[in-house]
Amino acid sequence: MARIDDISFTLLNTLVAVYETREFTAAADELGIAQSTVSKRIATLEDVFGLSLFVRRSKSELLPTPAGRRLYSSAAGLLQQWSDAVYHMSANNFQKTPFSLLLSHTASSTLLPQVIQGMQSSLDTTDFSAHTMNSEQILESIVKKHAHMGIVEKPMSTDVLRLDVLREDRLVLAGDYRQHRGMGEHGHPARSDSGASSTTSSAFPGEGEVSPDALWLVREAGSGVRYFTDLFFRTVGLSPSRVVELDSNEKIRSVLASGVGCTILSQDSVPEGIATVDLGDSFIRHFYALTPKTGLNPDQRMLVEKIITLLR
């Protein structure tokens, strides 16, 4: 029978990997060892404490027991302290710190310039990169530790991630939602006068006010703004028949700027000259920062805090 003295960082690292991936196979891939070795290490920990740490939810997915959650919390903190100690004793910490930031499409267009401006003093010592994905892809990447931080447009979290609330983002109805099939008057797309500033109405369109023939420009499922687009459809009792799905806000902005279609979009992203409708408090959302609870070195954690401060 295994004893408390038999517990090593190796066993605790394995526990953390299984807890965060919820799979023996995924944990084995992350650690670069055989799945059978992962199973044996978890069995050793269960033998030491006389407690079950995980139960099977399905053929591939594991759920932590209360004992598993307690041990994970303690092990993660202990391993982080040890990792920090090793980092500060290593000559490698004089090299540039890698830092990969993932942003949703709206965050990329509205927040990234401020992030880079605020990060300038850190760029001499940071190997910084930024990539754009939809919110679901960002969540998956941060959980798998393929990046160090993500900024999304809806509250997404698991118990292996830290979630921080950032600034507000107001969504509006942009474009001609009353436009009927075909083109606007005189054969041209209906839009505000060329070169005019965007105008905003505060009258939320009621049921029946949105034309069933309006052309809707929508993001793909899994994006932050798509959730609110579907919420708007439900609110006004609309099942649009003319929908174009686009995989980036820039594509939507480009089509919208030509005077074609309507969409739900961040107010800060609406092209010049496109009329908007304020949709009220239900369509004010926040940006959120996602970071892994384990695996970041001290310099990376400092960068996380700096970005959170910049964007609050």
Image: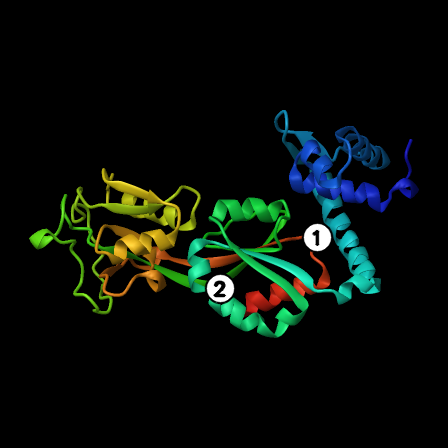
Comparing 77 with 179, the one in front is: 179
Amino acid of disc 2: Leu
Q: How many marks?
A: 2
The answer to whether residue 225 is left or right of residue 23 is left
Disc on res. 295 = 1
Q: Secondary structure at mark 2?
A: helix
Please name the residue shown 31% across and 61% down the image.
270
Q: Nearer the viewer, mark 2 or mark 1?
A: 2
Q: Is the residue 183 above or below the residue 203 in the image?
A: above
Residue 233 placement, left or right of 31? left
**Label 2 crowd (10 A; few <14 / some 14-19 / many >=20):** some
- Whether residue 4 appears in this view of the structure is yes
At label 1, the amino acid type is: Gly
| Quadrant in the rendering for residue 301 | bottom right
**First in sequence: mark 2 or mark 1?**
2
Q: Position of residue 203 (x, y in %)?
A: 20, 59
Badge 1 element:
loop
* Residue assigned mark 2: 112
Q: Is residue 181 above or below residue 62?
A: below
Q: Which mark is residue 145?
A: none
Q: How is the image coloured?
A: rainbow
Q: Position of residue 193 (x, y in %)?
A: 16, 65
Q: CA distance from mark 2 to mark 1?
A: 24 Å
Which residue shows up at 42% across the image and 50% down it?
224
Farthest residue to the left: give it. Answer: 186
Residue at 53%, 68% (x, y): give it: 116
